[in-house]
Image (spheres, rainbow, N blue to C red):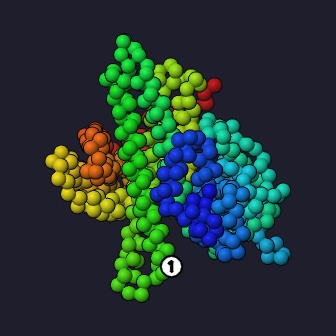
Amino acid sequence: MGFTLPRKYGGLNCPNLVYTMATEIVSRADCSLMNIFGLQGIAETINAFANDEIKNEYLPKFAEGEVTGAMVLTEPDAGSDLQAVALRAWQDTDGHWRLTGVKRFITNGCGEVLLVLARSEPEIKDGRGLSLYLAERCERVKVRHLEHKLGIHGSPTCELVFDDCPAKLIGERQRGLITYVMALMNGARVGIAAQSLGVAEAAYRVARLYAHTRKQFGVSIERLPAVAELVADMKIAIEAARALVYETAKVCDFENNNLRVMEFKPPTDPDEMKRRRADSRTYKRLNGMLTPMSKYYASEMSIRVANDAIQVLGGSGYMQDYPVERYLRDARITTIYEGTSQLQIVAAVRGVCSGAFDSFASECEAAEYSDADLAALKQKVVEAKRQVLDAIQFIKQRGNEYMDLHGRKLVDAALVVIIGHLLLRQAAACERKKAVARRFIETGLPTLRRDLEVVRSGDTSAIQEFDLIAGPPTVNG
Ligand SMILES: Cc1cc2nc3c(=O)[nH]c(=O)nc-3n(C[C@H](O)[C@H](O)[C@H](O)COP(=O)(O)OP(=O)(O)OC[C@H]3O[C@@H](n4cnc5c(N)ncnc54)[C@H](O)[C@@H]3O)c2cc1C
């Protein structure tokens, strides 16, 4: 614990990239356990935004593993839309803050330190009326209910009732959602992406071994083309997602490091300060795109890989004799919490359309490959970027609703380009990765072309003809 906390609080001061790798490893062992490990993000948020008194009181306890945290945001009427949070924060006659209301679906809600998003300004109905509070576990917070869920059974999901519970304000009033929770969630999203990698890797290892040892028709099933393709594509999917997630964690480190230098050791040379400020804007914009992309891509990948692992094991995969059915149930949560895939796409597509994609891909294009195969593959990825940019122009002319409708396809296409470049970079340093990069790009490009064709088609039938296609709502009974 205390992986990324400063040493003065007993932390390890590790870069986010190393923490991300550790998160993947913990998740490979146990997806539920990772939630406790990942909730170190609570300590990071305290470190980033709370006053020294709060930091000195709580951070050493986090680093020691003496306390664990919970991120207390969701309410019955405020899920994806956190601007609707209604839990009330009010000041008693002594000026002390109190919290009153209900939160649901809270991972580790029975933990000792709760970061609670609450409405401190009742007259302001949107996100600007929300502040962030620290509440300790006490008799004024009740776990009213523990959820019964599909997976992650080792991770308690709680409904919490706050009964005028004492609390401390974190940072400034009204910045709860807009500044603090957004920062907390961005870090947590990279954490869930790493969790997704870990579950997928665990499922892959079982499937890989089974494909090698299981014999049918007189051969190991890994020698049957259909199984070989399944296994190979599982491996490529994991390595593609890992390349993206680690790149994202690296850019987070660049951003954080740059901010720390400007805050604690500001350069005296005005030109350097100017450069650092410009870097800061670039990293922020890039992270605004890469973080939701990573969460979306890795979580969707982990469900696919865990599902395919069951297929590789056949009937045995469906039974509880092997852990793969559990991996699928565990993986299933990753596209839902910390913002659903749909919400990640809403965030990622804004980045794709606002120039972050173009500049990141252009930067990758500067790489020169002496290997002729890699150079040829790079040209294909360069051409693919051009097609994505054309589709972006088309989508922009059609407005926001069209962008929301086709966002997933546009983001998927952009991901083929970005990950294609990242895998080519790896292939230049590792012979085996050439095969990975080649297959990823050669199989990814036809999918990209298909997606972009739909994007450019102007089709809006899912919205325009929704009632006709979906029919009236009916109760299955
Ligand atoms: C096991 C588990 C643990 C959790 N842990 C925590 C926790 O520790 N702390 C916490 O605060 N919360 C936690 N959550 C809550 C979780 O973050 C929410 O469930 C999630 O954000 C979705 O909110 P919702 O369930 O209300 O779904 P809704 O917001 O009602 O969404 C329903 C559907 O509508 C889609 N949708 C909604 N808005 C949009 C939009 N603008 N564009 C496109 N599609 C949209 C969604 O993608 C989804 O498909 C947890 C949930 C679970 C299941």
Residue 159 seen in the figure: yes
372 vs 126: above or below? above
Picture quadrant where residue 354 is located: bottom left
Is 263 rendered above or below residue 179? below
**Location of residue 20 in the rendering, given as x and y in whole percent from the top left corner:** 50, 54
In the image, taking residue 304 as reference, residue 374 lies left or right, namely left
Q: Mark 1 points at which residue?
A: 263
Q: What element carries label 1?
A: helix
Residue 77 appears in the figure: no
Report the quarter where the N terminus lies. bottom right
Residue in the image at 38% along x and 72% along y = 279
- Amino acid, disc 1: Glu
Q: How crowded is mark 1: few (under 14 residues within 10 Å), some or many (20 or more)?
A: few
Quadrant of image for the C terminus: top right
Compared across the picture, whether 362 is left or right of 407 comes to: left
In the rendered image, residue 412, in percent from the top left (x then y), is placed at 36, 47
Where residue 199 sits in the image (x, y, percent)?
A: 51, 40
440 on left or right of 324: left
**Which residue lies most toward the top here?**
217
**Residue 374 spot, x, y in % from top left:** 21, 48
